[in-house]
Amino acid sequence: MSIAFAEPTPADVEEIARVHVQCWQESYAGLLPDDFLKNLSVDEKIAQWRQTVSDPQVFTWIAREAGRVVGFVSCAPAREGAARGADGEILAIYILKAYQGRKIGRSLMAAAARFWLSKGGRSLIVLSMAGNTQAAAFYEALGGVRVYEGSFVIAGTRIDEIGHLFNNLAELALPA
């Protein structure tokens, strides 16, 4: 089956929230406490995504296979604490584990780069957990340069994080 990409509608919000929770559970096992991951709330994510999808400052793009959301990206102006020299930020990019390795992530990043360029943006940053080596390798393969190392606390656990800066938006924006 082929992957279709589109801007989400309000009807997609619940599915985006379910994918978000499933991706956290798949990606962060061993990095975050098991109880925290087990108790992630799709309903809380629905509220978050309802707001995100309706926010004109935020670009969100979804990937579907057979009508089912299998991944998404979201970007916006860089948050003050995240900027590290970037004017835009990838707020989230997640692809269900079963769909990774099919260039979906590359296509989602390209869509975010095209959007940010259309807004006059020059660079994007993405923050990730330092222990998520698969994400770091993905960002670096796309030309992201590691520019930041820090930490934050989630569920009472200190998490090291890294930031990758993309100054190569014209190249990143090319189709996969």
Image: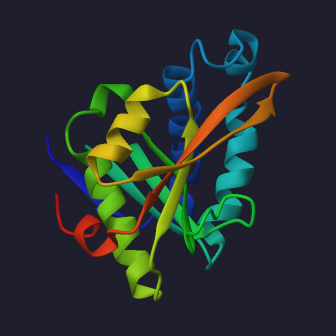
Percent across and percent down for residue 62 are 40, 56
Question: Could you tell me how many numbered marks the image carries?
Answer: 0
* Residue displayed at 53% across by 28% down: 22
Give the image quarter of residue 41. top right
Q: Nearer the viewer, residue 171 or 51?
A: 171
Using residue 40 as the reference point, say whether residue 20 is left or right of it: left
Q: Is residue 79 visible?
A: yes
Of the 4 image quadrants, the one containing the N terminus is top left
Percent across and percent down for residue 95 are 39, 39
Give the image quarter of residue 53. bottom right
* Residue displayed at 16% across by 57% down: 176
Q: How is the image coloured?
A: rainbow
Percent across and percent down for residue 165 are 47, 58
Percent across and percent down for residue 45 are 69, 43
Q: Is residue 67 visible?
A: no
Vertical placement of residue 102 versus 11, above or below: above
Vertical placement of residue 12 versus 76, above or below: above
* Residue displayed at 62% across by 62% down: 84
Q: Nearer the viewer, residue 10 or 167?
A: 167
* Residue displayed at 17% across by 65% down: 175
Vertical placement of residue 140 versus 174, above or below: above
Using residue 112 as the reference point, say whether residue 90 is left or right of it: right
